[in-house]
Amino acid sequence: MSLVKRRNIPAESLSKMAGILKTIAHPVRLDILELLEAEKSLTVSDIKEKLGQEVETSMLSHHLIKMKDKGILVSEKKGKYIFYQLRDTHILQIFDCMQACRMIWE
């Protein structure tokens, strides 16, 4: 008999978790999440500038749309600009969990 307490997370929720994790499992997407935590609301151009990486605007837009489609980000159109924001900042706790994981540092 196992002494480990299971969380008993429903299969549907596990599937949704896996989908979100798959979506953010890219260095640029993780960088975008951290940036939006600090800056709250940014346009594609703002994100491109602040990332300081050689990321094509079209690829950056692709990353943002993927995360928006999964419900990780929301957007708001103001004039001719679209501003992206985190839908729920709780997703950022994944950074704390991963930093605490010994596998990251081995």
Image (cartoon, grey):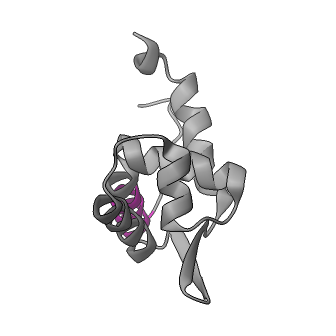
Judge whether residue 18 is colored magenta.
Answer: yes
Quadrant in the picture for the C terminus: top left
Q: Nearer the viewer, residue 47 or 87?
A: 47
Q: Is residue 69 in sight in this rendering?
A: yes
State which quadrant residue 75 falls in: bottom right
| Residue in view at x 61 percent, y 90 percent | 79
Q: Nearer the viewer, residue 91 or 7?
A: 91
Decide which of 48, 87 is in the foreground and name it.
48
Residue 70 image point, x, y percent: 41, 71
Percent coordinates x, y for residue 24 in the rendering: 40, 52
Taken as a whole, is the magenta stretch helix, strand or loop? helix
Q: Picture coordinates of residue 35 (x, y %)?
A: 60, 49
Taking the image as shown, residue 16 lies to the left or right of residue 49, namely left
The answer to whether residue 65 is above or below residue 104 is below
Q: Looking at the rendering, in which quadrant would you find the N terminus?
A: top left
Q: Position of residue 99 (x, y in %)?
A: 55, 26
Residue reaching furthest to the top: 106
**Magenta span includes 78:** no
**Above-or-below relation of 92 to 57:** above
Q: How many marks?
A: 0
Residues shaded magenta: 10-20
Residue in the image at 43% along x and 66% along y: 13
The residue positioned 42% from the left and 66% from the top of the image is: 64
- Residue occupying image coordinates x 62% and y 45%: 93
**In the rendered image, is residue 8 in sight?**
no
Task: Please give left or right for residue 36 compared with residue 104 in the image.
Answer: right
The answer to which of 39 and 102 lies nearer the viewer is 39
Left/right placement of residue 89 relative to residue 26 reads right
Residue farthest along the bottom direction in this orientation = 79
